[in-house]
């Protein structure tokens, strides 16, 4: 009997295997990896630069920047003095685990605490391709409109934190935060939510606190596993 596995499933499982290998490599080096996803222009690069500026004094940060073309974003991040690897996907609408594997090979992971990955600007494709990251973050932004959770449910379902950027222009866009959150809640109950403005800095502290807590918790879990591994 021939068992037919759809091609998409095969690609996904090959990707998942590579993602697991990336994750093991990051864990081995003690690096916490964050995958930032959003539509083009939502503010991925802006939030990354704000985050780097705020945490650079306490954490050793590296960046991987995925774009269909150009090094514009990678140059913006590298200008802050963090090691940055540019991935041009050559047309692909998302990063995949093989691309991250290549990027990791170009970084001195032992010299990093936090790796921030800027995925390709897209609200559909990146959701289904794991890279080996520890946490997935979706950045929505006010000019996109308050109905996006209803229209792009897969993206909202699969993330660990949701940023709503550009709250400085809430009124100009008649953005209804309650309606927006009501769309998110059934997809991802209790999702960590950070309304903020990369332009004015409002709301950034809560986001940074969340990130610090996640990194600390991760380190604690790693230490526990290490102890129980040694004792067993
Ligand atoms: N008004 C406003 N503009 C912002 C904010 N954050 C980013 N932008 C602008 O939005 C545009 C796209 O930002 P960018 O970070 O490049 O988005 P990316 O494509 O998701 O990486 C730029 O012109 C930014 O200056 C914000 O909080 N408020
Ligand atoms: Mg960008």
Image: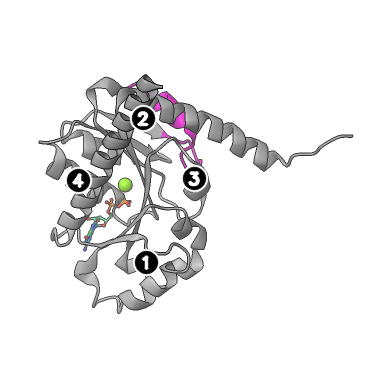
Q: Residues within 10 Å of mark 4 (few under 14, many from 20)?
A: some
Residue 215 marker:
none
Of badges 2 and 3, the one in the foreground is: 2
Looking at the image, is mark 4 or mark 1 earlier in the sequence?
4
Pick the residue in front: 61 or 120: 61
Nearest to the eye among marks 2 and 4: give it. 2
Tell whether label 4 touches label 2 (CB within 8 Å).
no
Q: CA distance from mark 2 to mark 3?
A: 36 Å
Q: Residue at x 29, y 75 (%)?
A: 173
Mark earlier in primary sequence (1, 3) = 3
Using the image, tell me which numbered label, if any, was put on residue 93: 3
Callout in the foreground (2, 1)? 2
Q: Is mark 2 within 8 Å of ligand 2?
A: no
Q: Are marks 4 and 1 in contact (CB under 8 Å)?
A: no
Residue at image position (27%, 36%) is 220
Q: Earlier in the sequence, mark 2 or mark 4?
A: 4
Residue at the limit of the structure toward the front, as seen here: 231
Q: Compared to 165, does 109 lie above or below?
A: above
Q: Quadrant of residue 123?
A: bottom left
Give the mark nearer the N terminus: 4 vs 3.
4
Ligand 1 - quadrant of the structure image: bottom left
Q: Measure how far apart labels 1 and 3 are at the Cα level.
A: 19 Å
Question: Which type of secondary structure does the marked residue at label 3 adopt?
Answer: loop
Query: In the drawing, does residue 99 fall left or right of residue 13?
Result: left
Any part of residue 51 in sight: yes
| Element assignment for label 2 | helix
Which residue lies under the disc numbered 4? 51
SS assignment at label 4: helix
Bounds of the magenta span?
A: 88-108
Q: What kind of element bears circle 1?
A: helix
């Amino acid at each position: 009997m021939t068992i037919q596995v759809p091609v998409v499933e095969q690609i996904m499982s090959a990707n998942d295997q590579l993602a697991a290998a990336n994750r093991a490599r990051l864990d081995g080096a003690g690096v916490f990896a964050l995958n930032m996803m959003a539509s083009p222009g939502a503010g991925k690069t802006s939030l990354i630069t704000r985050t780097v500026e705020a945490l650079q004094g306490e954490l050793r940060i590296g960046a991987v920047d995925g774009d269909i073309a150009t090094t514009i974003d990678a140059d913006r991040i590298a200008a802050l003095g963090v090691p940055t690897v540019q991935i041009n996907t050559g047309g692909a609408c998302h990063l995949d685990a093989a691309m991250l594997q290549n990027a990791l090979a170009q970084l001195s992971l032992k010299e990093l605490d936090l790796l921030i990955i800027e995925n390709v600007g897209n609200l559909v494709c990146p959701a289904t391709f794991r890279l080996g990251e520890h946490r997935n973050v979706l950045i929505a932004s006010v000019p996109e409109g308050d109905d996006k959770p209803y229209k792009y449910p897969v993206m909202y379902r699969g993330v660990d934190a949701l940023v709503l950027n550009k709250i400085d222009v809430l009124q100009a866009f008649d953005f209804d935060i309650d309606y927006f959150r009501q769309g998110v809640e059934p997809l991802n109950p209790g999702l960590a939510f950070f309304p903020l403005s990369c332009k004015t800095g409002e709301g950034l502290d809560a986001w940074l606190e969340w990130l610090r807590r996640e990194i600390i918790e991760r380190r604690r879990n790693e230490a526990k596993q290490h102890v129980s591994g040694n004792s067993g």
